[in-house]
Image (cartoon, rainbow, N blue to C red):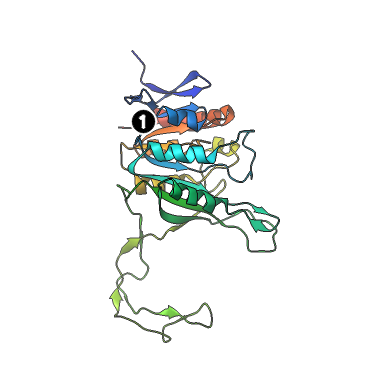
Amino acid sequence: MKDNSSTIVENGTDATIAAIPCYVPCGLELNKIYNESNLDTMKRMPDNFVDLTVTSPPYDGLRTYNGYSFPFEDIAKELFRVTKNSGVVVWIVGDSTINGCESLTSFKQALYFKEIGFNVHDTMIYAKNNPVPLTHNRYEQQFEYMFILSKGKPKTFNPIKIKNEGTGILKTRGRINNEGRKYDSNAFRVGQNTIVKDERIDYNIWFYSIGSTGTTLDREAFKHPAIFPEQLAADHIYSWSNEGDIVYDCFGGSGTTAKMAHLMKRNWILSEISSEYVQIAEKRIAPYLAQTSLF
């Protein structure tokens, strides 16, 4: 009888960590990190299998990824195949600037996703409250793109709502005048006064603090060169999935997606080709898997 644990697959071997095993008909085990290429993992997935993918691929060679390279088009096609009808892929990516010109790799990838059948449901912005200052002859880069790719109409949308300022106050609609960034309530009025509701659905520009005070409190995670905020992962997992759904990260990295999916009672699968990063993710998330049951 198998013990009450899931395993991290490391080059064909299993390293046991505490969690709850869950198997699917294809023989793939949920709640597991696979130390292999994401294409190898996805080959074992049946069609229409994953509810939500949240991932941030290496892009434009901005960081050396332990010598590994990634065939984007092959990965995109497999993501389309394994994503459930009405499922979502959150693709978090930026662009490099070479000789004063942005690569626009992000948009090339988004257009390819559209070409193979995904809908570009939304183009969201991951804005950093405290970006690393650099010296350029332009404004400092503060954001990355978050392409929300859906296979048909998303089956799940749990909108994040935020408190409105000035709740209950009558406001008159106006516009910015043509002379500058000043609100001129006398320049233009249209429609009727409205009562501001207590809360509203958030906009599609999301702000996060990064670094040791914002990304995570897990020191182990910072051994990975590129981690995104836990709250960012949590916000997308909440928005596009429900408890019990399958969440995938094809570039597992330090395990952020796995950690937040587990804490939010989703099943999860990670692919990570680097044994070094698998060890980081294992050490990082093991305490949470030991403390909390999925269901």
Residue 20 location, x and y as percent?
35, 26
Q: Position of residue 125 (x, y in %)?
A: 48, 56
- Relative to residue 231, is residue 274 drawn left or right? right
- The answer to whether residue 273 is left or right of residue 205 is right
Asked if residue 125 shows in the view, the reply is yes
Horizontal side, residue 61 vs residue 114: left or right:
right
56 relative to 166 in the view: left or right:
right
Q: Quadrant of residue 241?
A: top left
Instruction: Quickly name the residue at label 1.
Output: 46
Between residues 122 and 79, which one lies in front from this camera angle? 79
Does 242 appear above or below 194?
above
Residue drawn at the location 52% of the way across and 27% of the way down: 36
Q: Secondary structure at mark 1?
A: loop
Residue located at (42% from left, 44% from top): 89
Neighbor class of circle 1 (other Cα within 10 Å; few <14, some 14-19, many 20+) is: some
Quarter in which the C terminus is drawn: top left
Percent of width and height locating residue 48? 34, 36
Q: Position of residue 127 (x, y in %)?
A: 52, 56
Q: Is 254 situated above or below 113?
A: above
Q: Nearer the viewer, residue 72 or 273?
A: 72
